[in-house]
Amino acid sequence: MGMFEKRRFRKFLVFVANFDENDPKTFEGVDPQNTSMRDVYRKFDLGQDVIDFTGHALALYRTDDYLDQPCLETINRIKLYSESLARYGKSPYLYPLYGLALLGLLQLGQAPQPGDQGSRGRRSSLLSADSCG
């Protein structure tokens, strides 16, 4: 990605970060219910490689079908990725942080919590801040 492309991508990411579907002032001329994501990318003059990265790595779409859909869903997905990255640090995904074995337990709310007493009376450090790196 060249210097100018980085600048355009940054402007796009700032737009997404500031976007609030309940505040029309943040739309910057984009109607989130009617404007396609392809038109939003065109507005910021983003190249195909940045479009592919944004759609597949940030918004987690498997196909390019989202390009012709209203942009609101994609913007919300990108915002979720950004918020998750800010919350969890190096990766917005849970499995690098806790491992695949605990994901099912975390979802069910049955994973050991920091400070829990184990079956042998020892405190669990499984999910403590120290063990998560």
Image (cartoon, grey):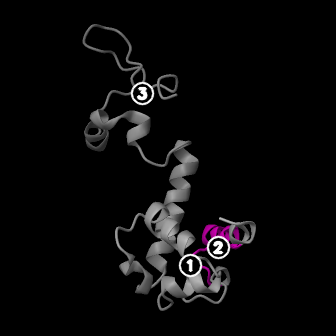
Q: Is residue 122 magenta?
A: no
Query: Which residue is painted at 35% across and 9% down in the image?
Result: 122
- Cα distance between the residues tagged 1 and 2: 19 Å
Q: Position of residue 103 (x, y in %)?
A: 30, 40
Of mark 1 and mark 2, the one earlier in the sequence is 2
Labelled disc at residue 22: 1
The crowd level at tag 3 (other Cα within 10 Å; few <14, some 14-19, many 20+) is some
Q: Position of residue 131 (x, y in %)?
A: 47, 23
- Cα distance between the residues tagged 3 and 2: 36 Å
Side of 117 where 132 appears, left or right: right
Looking at this view, is 98 or 24 the one in front?
98
The crowd level at tag 1 (other Cα within 10 Å; few <14, some 14-19, many 20+) is few
* Disc 1 residue type (three-letter): Asn
Q: Secondary structure at mark 3?
A: loop
Query: Which residue is painted at 55% across and 57% down in the image?
Result: 82
Q: What residue sits right under mark 2 in the picture?
A: 12
Q: What residue sits right under mark 3 in the picture?
A: 127
